[in-house]
Amino acid sequence: MPAGIFRVCLVVITAIVNHPLLFPKENATIPEYAEDIIQKMKAHEENLRLEQLRLEQEIAGQEAALKALEKATETEEQNIKEPLPWDLWSAMSMVIFLLIELWRQDYQDGNWQESACEEDDMAVLGKAFKGVALPDKAALANFYERCILGATGDMARKRELVEGFADDLLEALRSVCNRDADMEVEESIGVGSMYENWRVHKPLVCDLIVPFTPPEPYCFRSQTWCSRESVRPDKQGYGTIKVCRADEDTAGCICGKTKLGEDMLCLLHSQTNQTRPSGEMEDLLCFKNTQYLDADQVMKWFQIAITKSWNKISHKYEFDLTFNLLDSPGALKIKFRSGKSIAFNLTPVVQCEDSDAYFISHFPRSGLTADPASSTDWFVTFAVYERRFIHSISKKLPANACHLSCLQIVSFLHGKQCSLTGPSSLTNYHLKTVMLHLLQTRPCQDWGAENLEARLQDMLKFLEKSLQEKKLCHFFIGNRKVPEVLNFPVAFQKAEPLNLFRPFVLHRDAYRKTVDTFHEMLRNTSALINEYTVHIPSVGHTNMLHKESL
């Protein structure tokens, strides 16, 4: 539009400037051919007039187009004003979208920072072992003789004392219990570090498990987590125990699964067998209104039975027996008049089918291990198989093999580090699991006494890698390479591997604390070994002083 107006103005100005009236008539310099010039000027004027008309028509067309455009714009604005609610929802949707996008970015930034912290921890952890210089073979051997052997020299004597007293106590328990109504206890079984000969921390505590069975005509029927189609991760390693009559075939008869009519009876199971009073099941230590064995009820019964049996035989002994820990119902302590004491754990268990795996009513838990959701959930322990595996493979290893020495040294160093920097979620059972994996993967000849330093490095590297990956598999569960001589149940071998470090994924603070403690232990290894080697006399020197005093 402005360009068209400019062109019109330019034509008008040109026409005015070139009009013949601007030339005066009295001009004496008009050429001879003035008429020809005038004709040409008229022709030129006519051309300009035609150009002006053409431009005016073009301007008129542009103005018409502009009016049509303005009319269309007004129509569009009118249409836009009508759906106001739609624009409002669109605006609100856009605002909500922007808020969600901002929140998502902040959330990702937060996760990135947390993962960055974990990556920093992993970077430190990965470099921790590379900078560790372990003492030489002579220093390690001297340290082991002074610190380890000196602390565990009377292990066998304490085992013998505890086993003898436990047998007497359980025999008295059988006599005070009602054989027709109470649970029947069997002989105790020694498990754990004291019976695997690698415990180093004092007090030297013996762990004994006591299998028990229900009175006739009842029996236990157990179900483990691996026999179910799907199970939550926190339920792995647990099972339930159902109290049934011995003549009750719950798997083969459908009377318990199908609602029979009033005029129909099961020929295998009478109506009196199917309906039991709730009081009868509670007397069998079951959870209220169920047939499932209650771990809390079992521990209360066992404590009461132990107290009765001790009252019966206490006159035979010149010491006192007390319950040691409130949170561990099976923890007992023998107190001598001299002030010395011996602690041991006596824990009731239920045999899992016909195997040497047991459902344990109570076991010491680390800070990461949560209590079971129900007291009818029983943890499955493979302590008997672990002891049997160590005993079996020790026969194939060279004389004076270093596998237990490595485990004892790492356990000792970790315990001393925890006493300096606070407790850690890394337990002795984790350390033993590392040793069991290495015993299965490394050749037997590599465990000679001369390879103590190399195998100690292997244990620390394996533990470092497991912490870095937050993954340490249970040695038996899901392990298809368990030696056949152990007669380990196939169902547990085919089960999904159980990650002992899974709680680290959920408890990041505990994980960082564990990593820091392990890192500090690696850095302080040489200092701790040198410090305890200097201040503790050797076993031979101690024996020599003892003989001189005699």
Image: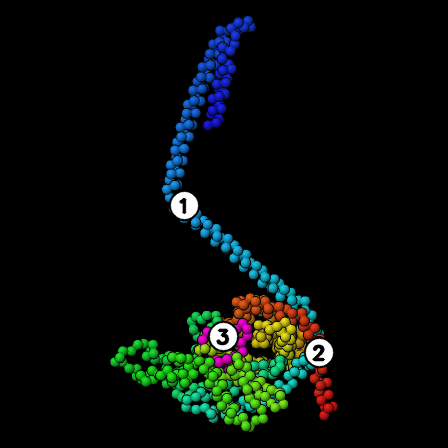
Residue range of the region highlighted in magenta in the rendering: 355-374
Q: Earlier in the sequence, mark 3 or mark 1?
A: 1
Decide: is 209 above or below 434.
below
Residue type, mark 1 in image: Asp
Packing grade of label 1 (10 A; few <14, some 14-19, many >=20) is few
**Amino acid type of the residue that numbered disc 2 sits on in the rendered structure:** Thr
Percent x, y of residue 16: 49, 15
Q: Earlier in the sequence, mark 2 or mark 3?
A: 3
Tell me the number on the disc at residue 533.
Answer: 2
What secondary structure predominates along the stretch shown in magenta?
A: loop
At 33% from the left and 82% from the top, the residue drawn is: 275
| Mark 3 and mark 1: Cα distance apart in space | 56 Å
Question: Closest to the observer: 299 or 502?
Answer: 299
Taking the magenta stretch, the answer to whether it contains residue 364 is: yes
Q: State the count of labels.
A: 3
Residue beneath disc 1? 87
Residue 116 visible: yes
